[in-house]
Structure formats: C-alpha cells, structure tokens
Amino acid sequence: MTSSLPLLSILIWLPLLGAVLVLLAGNQRPAVARWLALLVASVTLLLSLQLWTGFDTTTAAMQFTELKAWIPVFNVNYHLGVDGFSMPLILLTTIFGVLVIVAGWEVIKDRVHQYMAAFLVLQAALTGVFAALDGLLFYVFFEAMLVPMFLLIGVWGGPNRVYAAVKFFLYTFLGSVFMLIGLIYLYLQSGSFNILEWHELGLSMTEQKWIFLGMLAAFAVKIPMWPVHTWLPDAHVEAPTGGSIILAAVMLKVGGYGFIRFSLPITPDASAMLDWVVIGLSLIAVVYIGFVALVQTDMKKLIAYSSITHMGFVTLGLFIAFSIFRASPDGFGAAMGVEGAMMQMISHGFISGALFFVVGVLYDRMHSRDIADYGGVANVMPWFSMFAVLFFMANAGLPGTSGFVGEFMVILASFNASIWIAFFATFTLILGAAYNLWLVKRVFFGEVRNEKVSRLRDINSREVFILTVLAVAVLTIGLYPQPLLNVMHASVEHLLQQITQTKII
Amino acid sequence: MKVETIILLIPLLPLAGALIAGLLRNQVGRTGSHIVTILGVGGAFVLSALILKMQIYDDMQSMNYNLYTWGISDSVIFQVGFLIDHLTSLMMVVVTFVSLMVHIYTIGYMRDDPGYQRFFSYIALFTFSMLMLVMSNNFLQLFFAWEAVGLVSYLLIGFWYKKETAIFANMKAFMVNRVGDFGFLLGIAAIMSVFGTLDYAEVFAAAPSKINETIAVFGGVEWSAITFICVGLFIGAMGKSAQAPLHVWLPDSMEGPTPISALIHAATMVTAGIFMVARMSPLFELSDAALSFVLIIGGFTALAMGMIGIVQNDIKRVIAYSTLSQLGYMTVALGASAYSAAIFHLMTHAFFKALLFLAAGSVIIAMHHEQDMRKMGGVRRWMPVTWITSVLGTLALIGFPFFSGFYSKDMIIEAVGGATRFGSGFAYWAVLLGVVVTAFYSFRLLYLVFHGQTRMDKHTEDHMQETPLVVTIPLVLLAIPSVIIGYFTIKPILFGGWLDDAIKVSAQNDVVAELGQNFHGATALALHSVQTAPFWLMIGGFVLATWFYLFKPQLAENMKKRFSGLHSLLENKYYFDDFNNKVFARGFIRIGNSLWKRGDAGLIDGIGVNGTAAFIGKLGERVRKLQSGYLYEYAFAMIIGLIGLLGAWLLV
C-alpha cells in the first residue's frame, strides 16, 4: 500500500524541522521552546496514528513505502517502509516523543530549548531506524541517535555523567562498527544496500557466521545482553529523567528490532547454528541479572537491571524458534515466541518508561534515588503510590497488565523447545516479584521514614497526565492484546518462513 | 433478562462497586462506599442464587461460552469466557454469600479506620477476581484470576501499610505464592505444549488420549506428561491453598484486618487451590503418582499444622493454623479421588471458618484490638451472641454429629480410609489423629477466650460490651448454614450426582460411590457415628482440653515444661520460617551481591571495560568541555549534518 502523502518521511522530518525551530527560539524564551516542542511532537503523534488506521494486516509486504535514489553511484536509496514489526515500534516512538517533552516540562530549567530540540532529533532518528529499508540509511540513523542521547546524558545528567556518557557512546559505537563491516560486506556481495534484497541473498555458512557475529556485537550491546550490559545502569543513573525514559522505552528496542530485521532473515543458518549462544545469554540475563537487580540500592539501577532481564525474554523469544522447529517440524510455538518477544518490547516500553518517570517524580522532590532515603511515601503521596505500585506490579509480570503478555507467551513457547529453557525463564516469576515488591515495601510502605519524606507533595496534574496515559496503555495491552498481536501475524509468519529456509548456496 | 446477561452481571456488579468506591472515594464518601459495594456484592449473590435455583429446579444445563478473544497467536485462540456448571454455581453462591456477610460486618469492624473506602474497594475487587476464577472456562483466565486474588490479598494483608509486620507479611505471602506459581505456570506451559489449547473442555476431552505422552527431560529420560502437568498445577495449589511447605505465608497473613482473614484467608481464596484441583479432576484421575503426592502433602499439612495451633496464643493465629489443617483435610480428599468430598468440606468450612474468624474479630473489637488470649477469659458474660455463635462454629469445626462439619469431615476420613493409593495409609492416620488435635485446640480457644476467670485489665473490663448489630447479624447468618448445611446437602452433593457434570472419577478410584452404598440418610449417619473412631477421638480432644484449660489451668504449664522439646518444635513452627529466612531470603541476597560485585563490577567492568578506564578518563577530560557552552554548536552541527547527508539526494 502506498499512501498519497509520504507519511514516514513526515514523521522523520517534521520533528527535525521542529528541532531547528525550537533551537531558534533561543535560551531566553523557554516557554516558547516548550510549547513549540510539544506542538511538533503532538502533531507528529497524530499523524503517526494513520500508520495504525491505514495498516493492512493481511500482508507481510512493506507498507507506506517510499523509494528515491540517494547516492546512485553506490546504489544507496532513500528507502522507507513498515511492516508488522516496525509499525508498532514507530508508534511507541511517537507516543513517547510527546511524553518525554511533558516529563521535562518544568523540571528542566537549564537550556530548555536545547533539551527539547535534542529529544525531537532523537525521535526523528529513532523513527528513521525503524522505517529504513536501506542498510546505509539504517546505519546513519542508528548512529545519529547516539548523538542527542550522548548530549542528554553529558549535559543534563548527574554528577558522574561524563563517565556514563562516554561509556554509553563507546559501547554502542564500537558495537556498531562491527555491524558496519557486515553491512559493507553485504553490499559488496549484492551490489545493493536494499535490506529486502539482502533477505534473499544466498550466503555460505562462513559468511553468515561472520555477519551474524558482527550484527550480534551491535544489537547485543544495544538491547543490551549480558555481558555487554554494564553501560546501561551507568547511563540510566546519570541520565535526566526524560533521557532514561526514552532510552529504556524506545532505544533498547532497536537492538531487538535489529535481530528481527537483520540477523534472523539475513543469516538464518548461522542463527540456527549459534542460537544456543543467544539462548544461553538470555537465560543468564533472566536469572543472573534478576539476582543483581535484587541487591541494588539505587532505584534507577534496579530498574535498569530489571530492563536487562526483560530484554532477555525478547532475545529468548526470537531465538527459541530454531530449537522448536528441531523438536517438531510443525514448529508449534515458534510464532508465539516471536510474537511474545514483540509484545515484550512494546510492553516494556510503557512499563519501564513509567518506572523511570516514577523515580523521576521522587527525584525531583527529594534529589535522591537511594532506596534507603525513602520509606512510607504512600502516607504522603497516596495517588502517586497507587500508580507506582501498579507499574511495579506490571514490571513483575502481573496478569492483566502488559508485563504479563510477552513473558507468558515466551514461556509457553519455550516449553516446546526444551523444558529446561522454560524452567529457567520461569525464574522471573520469583525474582521479578522479589526485586519489585521489596522496593515497593521499602520505598512506599511503612511509617514515614524521615522529615524530608513527610514534606512530600502528591503529584500535580502534569504528572497525573503522564502516569494515566501509561497506566491506560499498560492495562489495555494486558487485558486485550489481540489488536496488537493481529498487526504482527503476517509479518511473523513471513519471518518464520525466512528463517526455516536455508540460504546456503 | 437473558441468562448470559445475568451471568455477566455477577462478576461485573462487584467490580463496578470496587471502582466507584476506589476511584471516587472522595465523592461517594464513607457511607456511599459501603452502599455501592454492598449493592454490588449483594446483587451478585442474588443472581448467583438465581442461577443455582435455575439449575436445581428449572433443569438449566451447564453453559460453556466465550466472552471475548484475548489474543490469537500461533493458531491458538486465547479466550476469556465462562463455564457455568454445578460446581461453578455452588462456588459462586458460597463466595458471594460469605463476601456479603463480610461486607456488612466490615461496616462495624472498620468504623474508625481512615482507609474505609479503600478497604471496601479492595474487598469488592477481591469478590470480582474470585468470581472470575471460579467461572473461568480456560487456564489463561484461571491464571489471571489466580494472580488477581493474590494481588488483592497482598494489598489487604498490607492494608495497614504503616505496620512493619503487615508489610513484611504481605510481601512474604506474594513471594511464597510466586513459588507456587512457578510450578503452576510450568504446568500450564506443559498443557499448551501437549494439548495445543488452554480451553478446559478441549483439554479434558483430549486427556485420555495423551496418557502415554512424555516430556523429554535429559538425554533419554522421559517424564509422563500428565503427571508433570498435574504436579505442576498442584504446586500452584500448594501456594494458594497453603499446603506445607508453602504454608508459611498464611499465619503471617493474619496481620491484615480480620474481615479479610475470614473472607480471603479462610473461606474463599485459600480454597482456590482445592477448587482448581477438583476442576481438573479429569486430568488428575489419569495420574496415580500425582494423586499420591497430593495425599501425602495434604496428610502432613492436616496433622502437623493443627498441632501448631495448640501452642498459639494469638486468637487469630489459632484459627489460621486450624485453616491450614482443614485445607489439609480437603487436599487429602482430593488425593483420595474424593473430589466431591473436598468441595463439600470446602463449602461447610467456608461458613463455619468465616464465622469463627468474624466471631474472633468481634471479640477483638470489644477488647480494643487485643488479640492475645492470655489477656482474655470470661468474655461470654458480656458477649452472649458472639459466644453462642462461636460455640456453634466450634462444634461444626470439630465435627460434632449433625453439625455441617461433621458430615464433610467424616466423609473425608471414610473416603481416604477406603482409598488404596500409595500414601493413603499415612493420610488416613493423619486425618484421624487430626480429629483429636482439632477438638483440643478448638476448645482450648473457647475456654481461654470465653470461659474461666477474666485476665483482662480493669480499663478493658469496664468497657466490655456486645458488638453492634452490623457485626452480630453476619455472625448469626453464618451460624445458620454452619449448623444445618451439611445435613441438607450431603445427599445431593456427595451421593446424588450433583457435581457429576464437573467432576470425573474413574470407576476403580471412586471411593465416594462406595460410601454411597452404605449411606442411609443424614440422620442415620449422625446416629451411627457414635460407634466410630472419629467421634471418640473428638470426645477425647474435648475432654483433654476441658481438663487442661477449664479445670486445671496449671496443668498446661506443667505439660509445657515436661515436653519442652516438642513444645519448642511447635512454638518454632517446625523451623520452616527460620530455614526460609536463612537459606532463601539471605541466600538470594548473598548470591545477588556476589554476582553484582564480583561479576558485574569485578570481572566485566573491572577487567573488560575499565581496563580502558584510563582511556575513558582522558576522553572524559575533553568531553567535560561540553558543559561550558559548546553544546549549541554540537547540536546544530549534528542536525545540519543529518539534513545535509539525507538531503543530498535532492541535489544529485
């Protein structure tokens, strides 16, 4: 389907244009910068809804495609399009595009225009990553999103922001260099940067293995997987609230999306051969990182570690497909695993975004993220605590919330691969409950711990707005995931066809 | 009104009440909140009774239909729907009736509590969740509701969230239940893998054909799939229905307000595991191994937990251990394939145990929230209604002939006596000895609270009086079924085939049918009981308790000293809590710390990452300049660069 308007281009370029205008507002007029940024993000969000309403769920073909020659000499094209994997992720991006601007509304007092502009640029780059169908275009957006995030941490971050920003940058940058080599190799083999053509490209096992490992380096860092995860807690701790929200809610998903768009369909044979590596690392993420999350004393670190365990379900859901097909040729459960991984990504977006905002609300008032500084918050902030308990419960995978859907589907699917994979994955029930509830107990329940807590004011209408939007999303997806699943079916079927056919020539 | 509409309204009315009382708590106020929730739950009760009536008198067939499609994945259709058969409607009536009584009672019990609206909202929400649990027609919704009742239980145990013991107890309850859910979820995953569906009817229909199906474990080792599924599901039931060793959360849950101890932690939620296993009887019947496991766990819980009740001094904790023991009885019945006997005891127990808890709560109100029985005594002088209803509840609990508990407990003992499965011998002796123990701790409680010399202080004594009508009316209304319900329902429920549309028992396992051959009516059964062992064991427990606590109070102290080893074993609850604290709670934290400090910080960051730390440090020096005004240019350069690069195609 082609739309009369170049919708995807508008979703990318409108925020960029907005960023320029916001910057022009200058440092002297923060109110103008705020309202302008909000206007741009809101219009972008409204426009992006057409992706949902105009989406054809019966086909796995790319939709809303745009194709223009960009650098013809190298056969590089400005090629955009979405399918059932990328469309929900773009909506996630545009929704959070608005929320992070509201989240930083009166909290950021320093260089407001630059802060707002950075988010608009980030949104544009993220949308571009999900919409790009050209390998080089993807790479440009992939790297472009590092810059505003780097600035957000480095400028508006906490005391140790430089270490965190540099660590973040180096990690992701080093990872993506290996991916770039892979992309260039694919170009040399196919004479094109078209990702869809790469899906059809025959490759020997050796070639596939190297490309797979190169991509793994990039996406494992991004998502992140154990043991290349240590940048994430540091980045979150130092990032301003809005930066943490967008990092957790959207940026991590680029890693999962990369596996879906590149690794699995381009190197299916290598993925099948090395699936045990990814499965092993995923289970380590679920169990090992679950334990590590339990002993964190900094709320943001705890949520960051819990993000890593949740992303473990994404990589697990994607890569158990191979052993499911090995166990039984009808592959029952493989689609459930992939769809569970997608649900987990969307759900984690809303839940982790909400949790970082929850911590932000407390930090704005107390200037501490240390669990030990809190206690009895429910006494002074009852409405806020109600939301917070809901989101922490959702983070513990409570049925009825979105947090349950993906984990449930992946666990059900993994049982078809091996009882032991399911066994270790199910540990999340216990560990997830432990670290979430223990935090809730120490921060929200109990007697008011100290005088600072006793002076806390409950949330204002701006904060209520953000929390309500996220709560509605978390509950809607939890109680009725079918519309979202329906969007994915055709693309998932297509992906499973791709990964079960050998590409070795 | 269509039947489907009635059925849908049954869970939705309490939900509406919960939402109004919770979200509009300031608008509806205190009175408004109890009016809306009582209307909701009362409506649900009336409609549930209507459904039951239609089944009994109007020959209404059981219904199984879906409400909406939750999701579709991998050609599996996950549904939300209702299965309304005789088992369901029985549970619906029990749940809504007890819940209604507790709602009314709460008006009195929570009168001065600042969280009044919140409390009503929670208990109405609980009623909704529990109804969704018993009405479910598939495993997904079962798990949903299973966790939802767990969540409300968590919120209610920690209702007084300032109280350190309460917020410890609610976290413990949730965690222990999650351990049970671990098995439950793996069981459900195995069902999905073996059957390809989560719909009850489809699973039950296909079950006999899957009896030889196995699950590959390791190399050549294969487990029976049905046994794996049943054990997994039962581990879930052990969490929710507090069977040893997952029972540890229930006594601590008494930190919550008494109305919820009655509703959630005695009458309804804790019986969800029993209900679930009975519902799954078509599966469990296919695995003798799983049922033996159920028998042994149940037998141990029934006897061992009752014994702890003997040494407790907190009035609510005695009843809590009694609940554990009674749940053990129900579990034993399940293990003996006497599912209908388990459900029968579940029902009678719901009435008399709710009564005993609410009566205890009535005493607690009068005593100004004192729960230590050592500071009570002689209370009957001031509280006749509470006293008499307590006596009636106690007689039902110990299984005195003609009282409701007599019929249900006697049938369990008889049934397990007739069972031949591995473990049935042990379970039989456990439930038999449990009768002495039950009678002993029950009368001990009765004497310590209501009889003998008063041991309360002068101030409390001056203010002692019977509790208001909102408290005593529910006691009376619960006392009626506690006395008579067994007499009138034993025949249809156990021997009249009332539950045959839900519970499937293989002919060779059907111990209840064997009992039916010797059943000559409820009166004859009660009269005959004086010739049986359970009756005299009960009398034995009663005599011992009377001797110890009514006539020779100092004797109890002497016995405590004489058997100090046993006493401290019971006092420390067989050291389950200490073991869990030392091994699991502290062990987990130690593992977490060492993985974090040695693994993440030491190995990965220490060697891998910060080997380049010097490098980063230097780089950091330069980047620090970012703060001093270079950002503007950076951001602009970035945007212009992006625009330039991407826009190049326009020019080419």
Image (spheres, coloured by chain):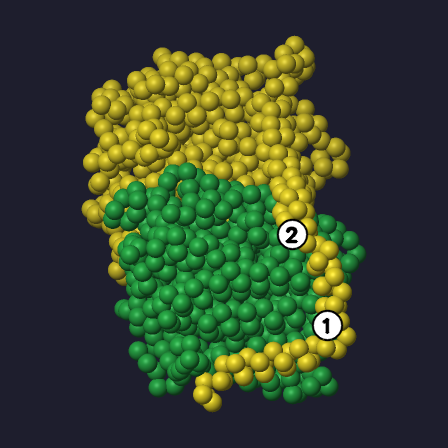
Residue nearest the observer in this picture, A102 or B612? B612
Q: Which residue corresponds to mark 1?
A: B626
Q: Quadrant of the C terminus of chain B?
A: bottom left
Name which quarter of the figure residue B516 lies in.
top left
Q: Residue at x 42, y 45 (%)?
A: A276
Q: Earlier in the sequence, mark 2 or mark 1?
A: 2
Q: Nearer the viewer, mark 2 or mark 1?
A: 2
* Drawn side of residue B311 relative to residue B524, left or right: right
Depth check: give the residue in front, B243 or A415: A415
Q: Which lettered chain is shown in yellow?
A: B
Is B490 situated above or below A375?
above
Tell me the kind of residue under disc 2: Val
In the rendered image, the residue lying farthest to the right is A451
Which label belongs to residue B609?
2
Question: Which chain is the one coloured green?
Answer: A
Residue found at x 70% / y 59%: B616
Q: Do the residues at discs 2 and 1 belong to one chain?
A: yes
The three-letter amino acid code for the residue at tag 1 is Leu
